[in-house]
């Protein structure tokens, strides 16, 4: 392959990062979904500091993420591009309810379907476990998150309010 030319196989496994649909797209390596691993924890914490909802919740902690993965090794889905984390979602299942949280997408990758792919994979996982309904935890003031969830068919449930207390 000479210069910057891409083969047809490269195009099928890559993702356009911008362009007008008329051949001017800049191509990037494909986004791959996989489960999160304990070895990812430092990168996850750094990623969430940039891309996550960081208001109104306790600070992220490596031990807590390790405990999460120890309890349910398949719950954390990671989107990765060229070896770099570009998205996450946690698909929590307690045997009764299916909870989606920690949906975060790298600001430079938003609007490219990364969040939608993560949520669809999380829903598939939870449906396989027996889920009949999903809920997404979204901070009330997170307009960007609310827009993303609404675009995927989620709606606020007006007759519920989440009540919390520190452990």
Image: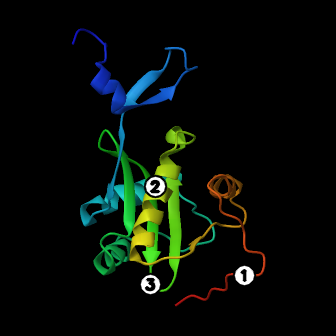
Q: Nearer the viewer, residue 148 or 42?
A: 148
CA gap, disc 3 and disc 1: 20 Å
Choose top left, top right, bottom left or bottom right for residue 43. bottom left
Q: Residue at x 65, y 58 (%)?
A: 153
Q: How many marks?
A: 3
Q: Element under label 1?
A: loop
Q: Is residue 39 above or below residue 129?
A: above
Q: Residue at x 58, y 19 (%)?
A: 20
Residue 105 showing in the rendered view:
no
Q: Element under label 2?
A: helix
Q: Nearer the viewer, residue 143 or 100?
A: 100
> Few, some or many C-alpha atoms within 10 Å of disc 3 (few <14, some 14-19, many ≥20)?
few
Mark toward the viewer: 2 or 1:
2
Q: Is residue 14 left or right of residue 3?
A: right
Choose top left, top right, bottom left or bottom right for residue 14. top left
Residue, far left: 1
Q: Which residue is mark 3?
A: 94
CA gap, disc 2 and disc 3: 20 Å
Q: Which residue is mark 2?
A: 118
> Few, some or many C-alpha atoms within 10 Å of disc 2 (few <14, some 14-19, many ≥20)?
many
Q: Which residue is mark 1?
A: 161
Choose top left, top right, bottom left or bottom right for residue 128. bottom left
Mark toward the viewer: 3 or 1:
3
């Amino acid at each position: 392959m000479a210069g910057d030319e891409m083969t047809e196989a490269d195009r099928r496994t890559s993702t356009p990062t911008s362009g007008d649909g008329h051949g001017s797209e800049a191509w990037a390596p494909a986004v791959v979904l996989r489960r999160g691993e304990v070895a990812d924890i430092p990168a996850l914490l750094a990623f969430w500091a940039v891309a996550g909802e960081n208001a109104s919740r306790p600070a992220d902690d490596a031990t807590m993420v390790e405990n999460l993965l120890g309890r349910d090794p398949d719950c954390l889905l990671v989107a990765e591009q060229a070896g770099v984390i570009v998205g996450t979602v946690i698909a929590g299942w307690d045997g009764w309810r299916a909870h989606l949280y920690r949906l975060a997408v790298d600001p430079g990758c938003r609007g490219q379907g990364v969040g939608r792919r993560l949520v669809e994979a999380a829903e598939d996982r939870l449906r396989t476990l027996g889920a009949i309904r999903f809920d997404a935890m979204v901070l009330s003031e997170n307009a960007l998150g609310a827009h993303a969830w609404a675009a995927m068919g989620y709606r606020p449930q007006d007759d519920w309010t989440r009540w919390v207390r520190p452990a």
